[in-house]
Image (cartoon, rainbow, N blue to C red):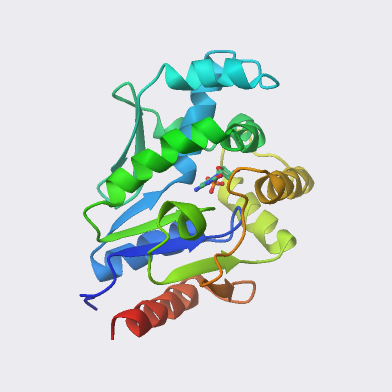
Amino acid sequence: MHNNGATAIAIDGPAAAGKTVVGNKLAKKIGYRFLDTGMMYRAATVVALDAQADFNDIDSLLDAVEQFEIEARSGANGETLILINGKDITSSLRSHDVDSQVSAVAAIARVREIMVAAQRKLAADGGIVMVGRDIGTVVLQDARPKIYLTANLETRAKRRFLEMKDLPEHPPLEEILTAMRMRDKIDSSREASPLRPAYDAVIVETDNMTVEEVVHRLCELVNGVTS
Ligand code: DC
């Protein structure tokens, strides 16, 4: 499939709704680049954890984040790679520590300003599928189509559990569920760019859909915009 019309596609939604897997597959199908913006907030969290910043103190977190250059790139499979001061730290971004602290870092308005500026720069040449929480509402308001991918909390926690079950430190399902409920709450109730569908987003509920079915649905939506 080739797509001559839309140049930026926004996919937003809560944690473990399938945005990364589906967004990456969609990007490959239509020959677009892919950017998972959650990885950038995770990188800021790794930096703050490494600097032993005080997570209850915004200035302490900002000091840590502003000292480092966070760069997002595409890997060989279209996946998002993150470099901090030139070093690839992608493999440390999905740890349990990062999972439990990232919402606090992502809620800081100044951190968001830095990330949004970098994301818009990466999208400037078009041909990009960008996934996150505020892509349709803030970062790329002209994106077409805008998709809001979601599923109920239990489905999403089970998906994350299955993803993590082969890692050396893999938390029980109940713990993932509790942490995810907390993250949903912080992400959608924060003052700076809260998680919500854009008014012109298409909501796709993925509870009873396979990855391939979701990708197929998204291709239909992209075709609807460009045909
Ligand atoms: O999608 P994820 O789980 O990797 O996102 C990590 C955190 O970053 C999550 O708490 C929400 C936040 N985030 C955000 O606020 N804005 C984005 N565009 C992407 C992620």
Q: Position of residue 70 (x, y in %)?
A: 37, 29
Q: Is residue 80 left or right of residue 198?
A: left
**Quadrant showing the N terminus:** bottom left
Q: Residue at x 56, y 70 (%)?
A: 199
Question: Residue shown at 43%/51% (left/top)?
Answer: 139
Quarter of the image that includes the C terminus = bottom left
Q: Is residue 26 left or right of residue 154?
A: left
The count of marks equals 0
Q: Please name the residue shown 51% across and 32% down the image.
A: 111
Q: Quadrant of residue 27?
A: bottom left
Residue 81 image position (x, y, % from top left): 34, 39
Quarter of the displayed picture in which ligand 1 can be seen = top right
In the rendered image of this protein, does residue 199 appear above or below residue 63? below
Q: Position of residue 117 (x, y in %)?
A: 37, 40
Counting from the top left corner in percent of width and height, residue 73 is at 29, 41
Residue 95 is at least partly visible in this image: no
Identify the residue at horizontal 61%, vertical 37% (top origin).
Answer: 107
Nearer to the camera, 118 or 82: 118
Q: In the picture provided, is 23 more to the left or to the right than 205?
A: left
Give above or below for 116 relative to 129: above
